[in-house]
Amino acid sequence: MEVIAKALRGKRKSLTEFESKQVIASYGVPVTREYLVRNAKEAVARAEEMGYPVVLKGSGPELLHKTELDIVRLNLKSAKEVRQAFKEIKVRAGKKLKGCLIQEMVKGQRELVMGLVRDPQFGPCVMFGLGGIYTEVLRDVSFRVAPLTEQDALEMMDEIRGRKILDAFRGMPEADRKMLAQALVGLGRLGVENERVKEVDINPLLLTKEGKPVAVDALVILE
Amino acid sequence: MGDKMAGLRRMFYPESVAVIGASANPQKWGFGILHNLIQGGFAGRIYPINLNREEILGVRCYKSLTEVPGPVDLVVVVVPPENLEQAIADCVKKKPAGVVMITAGMGEVDEAGKRKESEIASRLRAAGIEGLGPNCQGMMCVQSRLYAQYVWLYGKPGRISLLAQSGNVGSSILGRGIWHGIGFSKFINYGNEAFTPVHELLDFLTEDPDTGVIAIYIEGPRDGRAFLKSLSWAAARKPVVILKGGVNEAGTRAVSSHTGAMAGSNQVFLAAARQAGAVVVSDLDDFYYAVVSFAGQPLPKGNKIGIVTWGGGWGVLAADECGRLGLELPPLPEQLARELGEMLSYRWSRNNPVDLATSGGNRGLIKSLEFVARNPAFDGVIHIGIGMHLGALKMAEESFYMKQPEQEGLRKLWLEGSKKADEIIARKALEISVELNKPVLVASDMAASPGPGNIGWEVLNESGRLIYPTPNVAARAMSCLVRYRAFLDRGKTD
């Protein structure tokens, strides 16, 4: 893929969130609607186009851990808030800032994680599990060796302890397992077809009010 | 591939076996291996190799392997690491089909050992010789009466083959099975896996007509992808049960000091094994009962289980375990409930589990088993109630009341009756299961091993079955059968 090749030519070890999402989207993982913007004016224009609320994140090849750097502003409800957020991010990120990512604010209470790792024994493996802050605490994840069949993907969803999170409950609809399975199968294919992709981390992957999965953040690591 | 399999076949069904390092000292492994080979009744030629002796255990010795007249199919090497050089040089010259290297203190100890074993491996490979070990306790093939191993275990012929990285884990399954009268085919202990890789040994078992069930104990394969490929090939043809050792940090430390193998990232390994169709278990009990169940029971068509129990608690435990494992316990179809109600006392549960609440006697136990098994709502049955008669038997033998001369008639009745009761239940469980091709697992902690008066056990054992020790163990074994069936059925409904 050109995005990956370009990053490798630049001797980069990872892709930005924007690039990462382009890559995973091309393999069938649904991602947030988002645009790369250079200034506050462009940001506001895109926000008006998408409708509020929106999210603004600092972007640049060296800005890996955005939350820790405090360059993420959520739930911005007006042009004024977008302009203010842009200003703050610029100050925080300094010279490393190459632009900002403006994206739709996805509402969903259920956070999942998907990922790709390269196991020294088995090669590319796909991971699925509970996302957000629970990933590290509960370690409720399952694996499959790529390439995956749809059946593999459905089975790995059933394998996590917290699998009931995918069912309908508390007024939330059942998760779209078919879309989730397609995303997992796609991730496996990404790993098989791109040897220089070392890891992919999609966390969180939210379930919308309609039960559809959307990758809210993504990181592709290269080697 | 063809040559390789032919080589392994010759190794396990040899016409001649040599033991380099055969010893007359009963304290030595070189004695034990030769002794067990003779004791096992190997029908081919046996050649002990020993520099200083004319004969050991009545068998003529040779000073070196190259002195042996005619071909040698299998060579067991039981010499210390410092004497390996000559042994390997002779093997390369003599070109047996396979070598079992018992010798320990190699790659599992240090880097020098690793280098040494890989150097030997390339020489054997170049000569087209297969190999197990080093650092293993040997191999067995019941059908060829080949016991080239140190453990004192002689199986009766059966369809279970063990492929074990660790000799003692393999031995514990083999040992328990032999005690239980279960039949085996092969026990392959591959130790450090320096020679023939585990995936090729697995391919051999997949192609082996004497093997019907494959049991693997593994800590880490040398080549994960190749192992996975062989595992898929195997599981599509025969049930494969895997027990993986070294699942957490403590276990992994024990692994590296034990066999020198790299335990791959565990979660990925287990996922990969399941993906390939293996039934993965996590302790020796489940390993044993799963393997024996695959060898002795038909596969269920689905996951709907009926439970028949003499008493409530057993049924509750079985139902709990089924629930945990995702097995379904369908409610009783109306017609069946009516039939059971007509036969059983008013106390019965009127549901699945069918709890007789200690009513209905032996007839109740047998008839409810038959009714439930015959009903198409159920793919398999767990029956708990055999073995209680062992208690009645003991009572008839020891009761002060029955010992009175005027109670002789009653005593006789109890003695005869209790012996008969378990026999009838066991026979029914066996017959109905064979007739309907449905698994019927009988559980009783009182009767879960062979012993005097345990006629139920004897009846089931004749057909390679056994009595499961607890409702939980029976439910877990059932879930293994169900999981394998689900794997075979994958894609059929898509």
Image: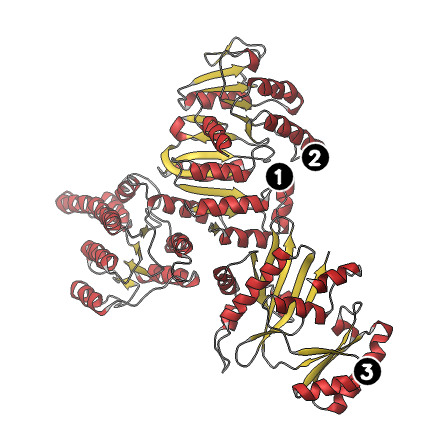
| Residue placed most toward the observer, A32 or B248 | A32
Q: Are marks 3 and 2 in contact (CB under 8 Å)?
A: no
Q: Say which residue appears at 58% left-offset and 43% top-offset.
A: B221
The x, y position of residue B467, in whole percent, is: 33, 47
Crowd tier of the residue under label 3, counting other residues whose Cα lies within 10 Å: few below 14, some 14–19, many 20 or above: some
In the picture, the quarter occupied by the C terminus of chain B is bottom left
Residue B110's disc number: 2
In this rendering, is residue B171 above or below B400? above
**Residue B65 percent across, percent down from the top left:** 56, 15
Helix or strand or loop: what does disc 2 sit on? Answer: loop
**Considering the numbered disc 3 on the image, is that residue within a helix, a strand or a loop?**
helix
Q: Amino acid at mark 3?
A: Glu
Q: Which one is closest to the eye, mark 1 or mark 3?
A: 3
Distance from disc 1 to disc 3, alpha carbons, whole Å, reads: 57 Å
Instruction: Name the secondary structure under disc 1.
Output: helix
Q: Nearer the viewer, residue B399 or B296?
A: B296
Q: Which residue is mark 1?
A: B258
